[in-house]
Image: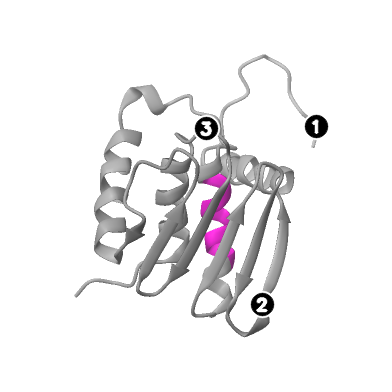
């Protein structure tokens, strides 16, 4: 039995593709039935079923496992929208329309849910999350007294 695709997973997959688009703007629609994506320069399907998202997510995971991904920035759009997706999973709302702009992300959901998220705040959270997940040893010889 296949588990339901989370919004966290779906947004990470779509945001990884969005990182290849030139303008940093997109319109996304998420629901339990899948997703729709539109952005300047978008070269992938507009409509995504949960299975399509899972398959693309598996492909991206294989890519991330390659050595060239070891030093990727921790505040990339995919990391930011993955965090936002985790927040949306907690809302228990059926569908969301998400507008990604260079400085903000606008989220509208079923039942009047609305949220505007500052991209700089999402980037900070993504960096903090990466630090918690993969603590790195102090390599410069300086020690913190915190």
In the image, residue 89 sits, relative to residue 61, either above or below, namely: below
Percent position of residue 15, x then y? 47, 46
Q: Residue at x 24, y 62 (%)?
A: 51
Would you say the residues marked 1 and 2 are in contact, meaning their CB atoms lie under 8 Å apart?
Answer: no
Residue for badge 2: 113
Instruction: Please state the extent of the stretch shown in magenta in the rendering.
Output: 79-87
In the image, residue 36 sits, relative to residue 135, either above or below, namely: below
Q: CA distance from mark 3 to mark 1?
A: 43 Å
Would you say the residues marked 3 and 1 are in contact, meaning their CB atoms lie under 8 Å apart?
Answer: no
Quarter assignment of residue 65: top left
Describe residue 108's horizontal placement relative to residue 57 as left or right.
right
Taking depth in this image into account, of 87 and 94 the one nearest to the observer is: 94
Taking depth in this image into account, of 90 and 109 the one nearest to the observer is: 109
Q: Residue at x 63, y 70 (%)?
A: 108
Q: Is residue 91 magenta?
A: no
Residue for badge 1: 145
Residue 4: mark: none
Describe residue 73's horizontal placement relative to residue 106 as left or right.
left
Circle 3 sits in a helix, a strand or a loop, which is it?
loop
Give the main secondary structure of the magenta stretch. helix
Q: CA distance from mark 1 to mark 2?
A: 43 Å
- Single out the mark in the foreground, 3 or 2: 3
């Amino acid at each position: 039995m296949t588990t339901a695709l989370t919004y966290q997973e779906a947004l990470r997959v779509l945001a990884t593709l969005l990182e290849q688009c030139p303008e940093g703007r997109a319109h996304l629609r998420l629901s339990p039935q899948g997703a729709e994506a539109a952005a300047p320069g978008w070269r992938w399907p507009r409509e995504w079923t949960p299975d399509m998202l899972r398959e693309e997510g598996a492909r991206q995971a294989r890519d991330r496992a390659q050595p060239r991904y070891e030093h990727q920035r921790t505040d990339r759009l995919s990391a930011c929208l993955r965090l936002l997706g985790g927040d949306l999973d907690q809302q228990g709302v059926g569908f969301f329309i998400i507008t990604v702009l260079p400085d903000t992300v606008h989220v509208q959901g079923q039942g009047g849910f609305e949220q505007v998220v500052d991209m700089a705040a999402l980037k900070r959270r993504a960096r903090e999350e990466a630090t918690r997940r993969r603590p790195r040893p102090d390599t410069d010889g300086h020690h913190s007294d915190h």
